[in-house]
Image (cartoon, coloured by chain):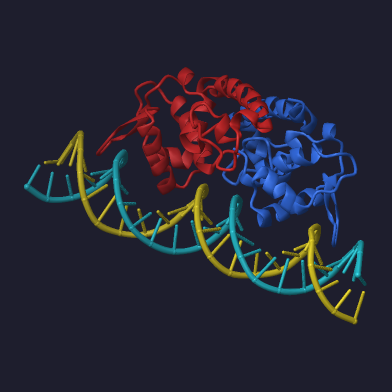
Chain colours: A red, B blue, C cyan, D yellow
Amino acid sequence: MLSHKAKYALKALLFLAQQDENHISRTIEIAEAANIPKKFLEQILLDLKRGHFVGSKQGKFGGYYLLKSKNDITLADIHRLFDGAIALLPCASLNFYERCSDCTSESECLLRQGLMTIRDETLKAMQGITIASLVKK
Amino acid sequence: MLSHKAKYALKALLFLAQQDENHISRTIEIAEAANIPKKFLEQILLDLKRGHFVGSKQGKFGGYYLLKSKNDITLADIHRLFDGAIALLPCASLNFYERCSDCTSESECLLRQGLMTIRDETLKAMQGITIASLVKK
DNA sequence: TTTAAACTCTACTACTTTTATGGAATTAGT
DNA sequence: ACTAATTCCATAAAAGTAGTAGAGTTTAAA
């Protein structure tokens, strides 16, 4: 399941993607339109900024705007930024690989191989869903 | 990501699946073989019992055994039992449907449709992985 | 240079989930 | 009946998540 942060991030990105080119949206606008607690959204937008998905303009008349193209932001990206690994266990993850502490022999693990298969399929599906593809509907 | 409970449950089921027919395994045996904290495993086995995946015999010389066939226990089943919905949001879930509290109109939600696609693909992949298929490797 | 409007950062609280523990109930054998 | 071995159950401790609060920084305009 997605965390609230990831869900809110997606909703915020969808909102930004629907604005005119070069338009800057204030946090409060996004929060109200997408029904997200404003102070919580502030943190999320900062995370998105640090992830280089959105840009910001500070000060009066400041706000946020999409930095990457709608087509280049995928569900997989947002999942990784807020919820981490897409694989079901860290030992089966590409970007967040970590050895299981309870694992005695990774090569003999009966689980790992199956979970890598799942990861590949899930990842492919998630990379197919972009902000642009979601807006189009 | 899977919770530790789900991971341990899978490891315990794999252990049970590798025992002789009619063999009863004590918690401590499973815990040591699969490197799982024993007291934690007790809870997990109870959950598996309540889910009718394993059966138990109480008292001295008691223990656990597989109740369902190896072929009828899928990754999807275990995920649902311990970690709940397979969908990324409750509003896109088949078995754990719940309306998002921040949702103003589910039918107009741009996210939901995409997440249902992901759910279908993930579910299909997870249902293809059974305890039997994992043991075979 | 002052003010207002906005983003940025840090810390805190409440809540939920995860993990761990202690003890009660059950069973088999003597 | 007693004892030892084992499952079963309720609750406590720890960790993570969701959301809040407030002060600090930046910018534009008057």
Image height of A66 relative to C13, above or below: above
Q: Residue at x 68, y 27 (%)?
A: A114
Residue A19 image-quadrant placement: top left
**Is A115 left or right of A24, judged from the image as shown?**
right
Give how far across and how far down residue B22 sits, in percent.
90, 44
Residue B135 image-quadrant placement: top right
Q: Residue at x 87, y 44 (%)?
A: B67
Q: Pick the quarter of the image with the C terminus of chain A.
A: top right
Give how far across and how far down residue C24 sits, in percent.
77, 74
Give how far across and how far down residue A58 sits, in percent.
26, 36
Q: Is residue B33 visible?
A: yes
Count of numbered tags: 0
Image height of A105 relative to A17, above or below: below
Q: Residue at x 66, y 35 (%)?
A: B87
Q: Pick the quarter of the image with the N terminus of chain A.
A: top right
**Is A92 left or right of C8, judged from the image as shown?**
right
- Of residues B81 and A6, the one nearer the viewer is B81
Image height of A11 relative to B28, above or below: above
- Of residues C9 and C20, the one nearer the viewer is C20
